[in-house]
Amino acid sequence: MAWTVPKLKALKGKQKLVALTAYDALSARYADQAGIPLILVGDSLAMTVLGYETTLPITMDEMVHHTAAVSRGVSEGLVVADMPFMSYQGTVEHAIENAGRFIKEAGADAVKIEGGALRGPLVEKLVSNGIPVLGHIGLTPQSVKEFGGFKAQGKTAEAARNLMDDAMVLEQAGAFAIVLECVPAELAKTLSAALTIPTIGIGAGPHCDGQILVFTDVLGMGQGHVPSFVKKFADLKPQIEQALAAYKADVESGGFPQV
Ligand code: KIV
């Protein structure tokens, strides 16, 4: 049976929620066949697959194109599309129009937006228009310029209080779950206990209601920086390199194809 927003919310306190990014129909099929309930078309697509330095340059059209491919590869999981930088920070009308494209054109089930209390009114508007929202607070990569780099958040008492406010506002506004990225494990534990909706951690310790990782990191096949909190469940990069070197050598030596 396909995953829905109410089914995911009902996991809180009963079972850990597993989430993974996917960027095309191939990665989505693998994630779906593994039974991953939440499949996020993260804007990390910009860096992991499209060769950008940050997530900032990726466009709505690029995200819609890849989300549609992921939707084609998924039959059970809940597909969440990440709203890219500047697709929701302007007017509410512009944000609703963009979020609507993910549902209508790309077959997504929900959208993710970065930011806390400031996003409350937008989350409320999206949810009341039938578009489920996954929140995202802590290290929000679209604010990398404001943070001065990819830095852990919520380390001071004041920052922790602000994150608690952010989480409460998002829950109140109707977000169905919240990603906590790179916040201290104890803070993630407090937030998870205070909220009635699931928290999904990435670099936020073991006490969150669920975990999310990036597809290429889980498989050890990425080419860029891998954060220290990542656990590789396979190490495909050397295998890919060896296979491609063997193919090249075989063709060059005449070993492939055989007569
Ligand atoms: O873009 C992304 O992949 C993300 C997750 C890692 C949470 O936002």
Image (spheres, grey):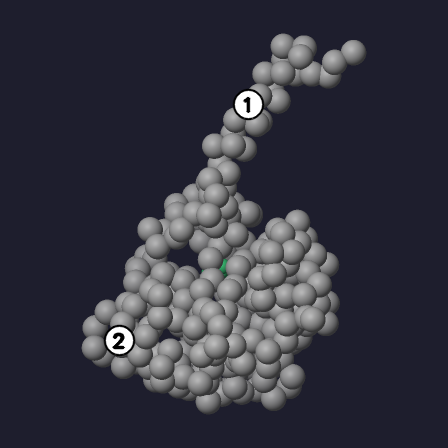
Nearest to the observer: residue 119 or residue 178? 178
Tell me the SS state at disc 1.
helix
Q: Is residue 167 above or below residue 258?
A: below
- Crowdedness near tag 1: few (<14), some (14–19) or many (≥20) residues, C-alpha within 10 Å: few
Q: Earlier in the sequence, mark 1 or mark 2?
A: 2
Q: Is residue 173 above or below residue 79?
A: below
Q: Is mark 2 within 8 Å of ligand 1?
A: no
Residue at the image point whose x is 47% and y is 70% from the top: 16
Q: Which callout, 1 or 2, points to the residue nearer the camera?
A: 1
Residue type at numbered disc 2: Ala
Q: Position of residue 23 (x, y in %)?
A: 60, 54
Q: Which quadrant of the rendered structure holds the N terminus? A: bottom right
**Circle 1 is placed at which residue position?**
245
- Dividing the picture into quadrants, the one containing residue 133 is bottom right
Q: Label 1 sits on what residue type? A: Ala
* Residue 46 in sight here: no
The residue that label 2 is drawn on is 159
Q: Residue at x 30, y 60 (%)?
A: 151
